[in-house]
Image (cartoon, rainbow, N blue to C red):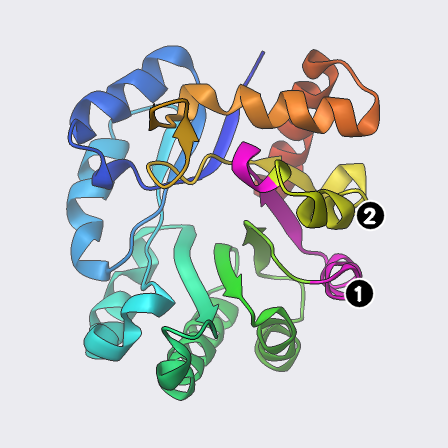
Amino acid sequence: MRLVDLHCHLDLYPDFEAMVSECDRLGIFTLAVTTTPKAWSRNHKLASSTKFVRAALGLHPQLVAERWKEIELWERLLDQTRYVGEVGLDAGPRYHSSLGRQTEVFRHILQCCARAGGKILSIHSVRSASKVLDLIEEEASDGRTRFVFHWFTGSVAEARRATELGCYFSVNAEMLSKERARAVVATIPDDRLLTETDGPFTWNGQISARPKDVGAALSLLGKMRGLPETRCAELVFQNFKALTAH
């Protein structure tokens, strides 16, 4: 099976370089998201020598309160990559106080990506899916930018709205172990589904999940949709090709 892990923090594993090599050796299409633009250079250097790993330029909303000034560096680096992430909003209790600043930063990211065209964003949207969608509609709804909601925690109505805007969704096994998440994912069209691990923040037994463990999400998707795991893998790979074709 051709596996796709569209959201993994490879640089947060202790064996970062070995992880990049493993993904490439196993032929797993892996998006190495970053949390700050200062992490970009090393990720890009390692990924650029591979066939299957790509690095994404990020500024994580949970870090915006302390590191929002790095948006200037982020903007300078944008022309070096097609992939952007992890970016977005987090309105959870711990980060709600910085939501105003997060919104400013994310709006600027969307504006820059809209001007550049052809970018693919991996989006964080904890308790903020509607606000994220508002910003997409305001700043980047012309179809030149592609959006993937990572670990989507919004409602069925918000998922439908995102689908109508052309968004994709990357799902992981831990997410699909929750009844509420499964109910939302069940409403997402087959042609908008992708897979992720969000490693090392998810688990395979007692150890952090790695991109090679993304098959667990495929297995759960298959059970939900009454499809063999191999068919789910084909479906996700076709969606990945469609996402990256433009």
Residue bounds of the magenta highlight: 155-175
Q: Residues within 10 Å of mark 1 (few under 14, many from 20)?
A: few
Question: Residue 14 location in percent, x, y?
Answer: 15, 32
Q: Residue at x 69, y 15 (%)?
A: 229
Q: Position of residue 11 (x, y in %)?
A: 22, 40
Residue 239 left/right relative to 195: right
Q: Is residue 15 above or below residue 58?
A: above
Residue at disc 2, secondary structure: loop
* Amino acid type, label 1: Ala
Q: Position of residue 107 (x, y in %)?
A: 47, 79
The answer to whether residue 70 is left or right of residue 9 is left
Q: Secondary structure at mark 1?
A: helix
Decide: few, some or many residues near mark 2? Use Cα within 10 Å; few <14, some 14-19, many ≥20: few
Q: Look at mark 1 in the image and give the residue it sits on.
A: 157
Name the one closer to the observer, 214 or 208.
208
**Vertical placement of residue 233 versus 92, above or below:** above
Amino acid type, callout 2 = Thr
Give the residue at x 73% y 65%. Answer: 158
